[in-house]
Amino acid sequence: MALSNNDIFKKLRVAHKLRDDDIVKICSLVDFSVSKSELGAIFRHESHPKYVECGDQFLRNFLNGLVIHMRGPMPEKKPKAPSKPKRPKSQDNK
């Protein structure tokens, strides 16, 4: 029995005690807009006429936003200083 994206999304929502407003804010962290009505359609039962499958892109964006929400934004990387080229070892030992 494989879990669908909807099942994974529902389990994450319950595990993190997220409300629709929280999910909308989390998705906005990665510039992904979603409405509460779209969320309602994803969280419906499969037999409901207005049920919508959660796509890979939707789940991926939510997970990326959740990482930012939980950890905070990634710090900017400082450019590395150019390193000096290594000299080959002299082979004067004969």
Image (tube, rainbow, N blue to C red):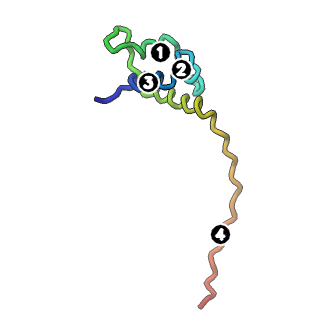
Identity of the residue drawn at 43% across and 24% down: 11
Looking at this view, name the residue that lies furthest to the bottom.
Answer: 94
Q: Nearer the viewer, residue 32 or 13?
A: 13
Identity of the residue drawn at 51% across and 12% down: 36
* Front: mark 1 or 4: 1
Residue at image mark 4 = 86
Q: What separation in Å lies between label 3 and label 1 (alpha carbons)? A: 10 Å
Label 4: how many Cα within 10 Å (few below 14, some 14–19, many 20+): few
Mark found first going from the N terminus, 3 or 4:
3
* Front: mark 3 or 1: 3
Mark found first going from the N terminus, 3 or 1:
3
Mark found first going from the N terminus, 4 or 2:
2
Relative to 65, residue 51 above or below:
above
Residue at image mark 1 = 39
Residue at image mark 3 = 9
Mark found first going from the N terminus, 2 or 1:
2
